């Protein structure tokens, strides 16, 4: 048996007690690196109790002091950047450069929390009536929980717990069971940065742990990122139990290519956005919509050799463009979609199935796949494949391209490549997606804006990170006050307007 990861409960490494574990693989070699304990309801409860005990003191800690911990945590991450990056790549499979980039994006969200005082500042209205002042403040929810997907094992937890904790909440994180080592390490580093015990806890687990979180009466808020199927369940069960829940789901991101676009730039953009991280990104472009048959031909002509020449390798290969898929099950699923696409009548211009790398025969590698003449009734169009598969859906007119894009049930990211400002402006205004790129294929907003899709990519009132996260992780309160000198004599029985004397 390999090493078994501990949970992180109450500021200490805590061995799993359920007797149930799952293996964590290195997707490049197929070797089992370690095992993760799968928490049961009792272990989730232990983490929640630790968080509940820590809440009174932490929520009463001045925001400026909380921010000091965030500054130190940031330093710790910088000191351990290579170690965390390696943990991510080893368990996820993505290249080291890509893992580093996603850690930097998570770090930027953490940096935003270093100025949390600015966002927790209240408002005061003096004299809302004679002698009466009103203040508006925001207070933390209590114990919050985060449930995160495998594809950004460090970045997405960093989108959640620093902001929740900076707002004065305490937190239980349930990272993906497929690559949980990096988030565990982040919790340890935050402790080293001075976070009091119990403020941040990590429990590993699968559905049993998630259900225990959703049913736990002491958890007030839940943030979830993952597939739409699960996001919907999380939202429904969590809100039915009276919790505040934000759940972010899957995607099918479209990129419209106009005839006036620079075709080489468009092809390069599609290559990086479609095949980076083996397509395992919620903002990956998985559908290209060229407008006009000539544009379609020009795009395919440029894309096909680029896709064939993608360099695929383990994360230790610094020349690799992309790594393996996360698991043999993921590879089987994605290759199954390629077969489905062929059966459905799409044209497989490049078929990435059947790739084996010498020395990595047990790795979950797959080459890039490019489909042309995909239609909107095909399963490969309708469903999220979450692999290195790009579908080209040809449109005859800009309006048809817009209609195709808007017709999809998901609404995370959409992009247009064009050199015409009017066309870009009309597309940006009319497209029914939460994040829009103009000549930018993956329009992920920076930390001081917020991230969120539309339609069935989101089940939430608030987007994630940025100012929206402060609203999610806090409750609004008004305090209306007057002092004895302003209180007249006698009881008041009638409602009064502010301007009544
Ligand atoms: P997933 O939905 O399988 O798992 C996400 C989390 O939910 C994990 O922690 C997992 O343990 C848990 N889970 C899985 N099945 C569950 C069930 N039946 N009941 C309760 N909990 C369950 O997602 P994944 O495969 O880890 O990640 C890929 C998905 O995440 C893709 O659909 C991708 O688009 C999406 N994603 C979305 C965003 C976004 O911001 N919208 C960002 C990243 C990933």
Image (cartoon, grey):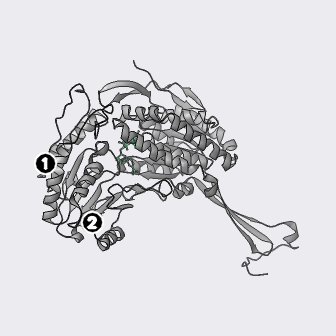
The residue that disc 2 covers is: 418
Residue 202 image position (x, y, % from top left): 52, 35
Judged left or right of residue 2, residue 16 is: right
Task: Identify which residue is drawn at 25% across, 57% down.
Answer: 265
Judged left or right of residue 464, residue 362 is: left
Q: Is residue 109 above or below residue 258?
A: above
Residue nearer the viewer, 177 or 434: 434
Which quarter of the rendered picture does the C terminus lie within? bottom right
Residue 431 image position (x, y, % from top left): 33, 67
Residue nearer the viewer, 466 or 81: 81
Residue 267 visible in rendering: yes
- The residue lying furthest to the top in this view is 1
Task: Identify which residue is drawn at 34% across, 54% down.
Answer: 442
Which quarter of the rendered picture does the N terminus lie within? top left
Residue 150 visible in rendering: no
Residue 117 image position (x, y, % from top left): 64, 54
Q: Earlier in the sequence, mark 2 or mark 1?
A: 1
Nearest to viewer (mark 2 / mark 1):
2
Judged left or right of residue 250, residue 163 is: right
Task: Identify which residue is drawn at 33% across, 58% down.
Answer: 440
Q: Gap in Å between the C-alphas at discs 2 and 1?
A: 26 Å
Q: Is residue 410 above or below residue 106?
A: below
The residue that disc 1 covers is: 348
Q: Element type at marker 2? A: loop
Residue 198 image position (x, y, % from top left): 61, 36
Q: Element type at marker 1? A: strand
């Amino acid at each position: 048996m390999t090493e078994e990861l501990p949970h992180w409960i109450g500021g200490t490494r805590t061995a799993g007690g359920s007797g149930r574990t799952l293996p964590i693989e290195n997707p490049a070699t197929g070797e089992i690196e370690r095992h993760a304990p799968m928490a049961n309801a009792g272990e989730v409860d232990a983490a929640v109790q630790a968080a509940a005990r820590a809440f009174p003191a932490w929520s009463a800690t001045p925001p400026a002091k909380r921010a000091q911990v965030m500054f130190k945590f940031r330093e710790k991450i910088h000191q351990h950047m290579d170690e965390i990056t390696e943990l991510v790549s080893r368990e996820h499979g993505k290249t080291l450069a890509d893992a580093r980039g996603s850690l930097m994006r998570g770090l930027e969200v953490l940096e935003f929390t270093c100025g949390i005082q600015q966002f927790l500042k209240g408002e005061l209205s003096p004299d809302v009536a004679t002698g009466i002042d009103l203040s508006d403040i925001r207070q933390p929810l209590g114990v919050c929980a985060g449930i995160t997907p495998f594809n950004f094992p460090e970045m997405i937890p960093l989108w959640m717990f620093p902001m929740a904790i900076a707002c004065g909440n305490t937190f239980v994180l349930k990272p993906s069971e497929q690559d949980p080592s990096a988030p565990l390490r982040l919790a340890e580093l935050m402790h080293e940065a001075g976070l009091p015990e119990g403020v941040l806890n990590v429990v590993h687990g699968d559905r049993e742990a998630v259900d225990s979180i959703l049913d736990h009466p002491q958890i007030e808020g839940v943030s979830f990122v993952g597939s739409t199927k699960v996001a919907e369940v999380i939202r429904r069960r969590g809100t039915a139990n009276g919790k505040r829940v934000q759940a972010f789901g899957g995607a099918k991101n479209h990129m419209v290519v106009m005839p006036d676009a620079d075709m080489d730039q468009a092809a390069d953009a599609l290559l990086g956005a479609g095949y980076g991280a083996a397509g395992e990104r919620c903002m990956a472009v998985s559908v290209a919509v060229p407008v006009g048959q000539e544009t379609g031909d020009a795009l395919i002509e440029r894309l096909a050799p680029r896709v064939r020449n993608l360099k695929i390798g383990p994360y230790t290969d610094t020349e690799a463009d992309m790594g393996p898929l996360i698991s043999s099950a993921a590879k089987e699923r994605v290759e199954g979609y390629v077969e489905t696409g062929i059966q459905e009548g799409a044209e497989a211009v490049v078929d990435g199935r059947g790739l084996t790398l010498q020395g990595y025969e047990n790795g979950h590698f797959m080459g890039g796949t490019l489909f042309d003449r995909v239609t909107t009734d095909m399963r490969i169009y309708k469903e999220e494949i979450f692999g290195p598969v790009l579908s080209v859906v040809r449109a005859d007119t800009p309006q048809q391209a817009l209609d195709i894009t808007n017709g999809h049930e998901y609404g995370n990211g959409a992009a247009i490549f064009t050199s015409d400002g009017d066309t870009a402006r009309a597309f940006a205004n009319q497209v029914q997606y939460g994040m829009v790129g103009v000549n930018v294929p993956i329009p992920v907003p920076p930390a001081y804006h917020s991230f969120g899709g539309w339609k069935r990519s989101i089940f939430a009132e608030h987007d994630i990170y940025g100012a929206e996260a402060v609203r999610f992780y806090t409750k609004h309160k008004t305090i209306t006050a007057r002092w004895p000198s302003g209180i007249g004599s006698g009881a008041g029985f009638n409602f009064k307007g502010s301007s009544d004397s």
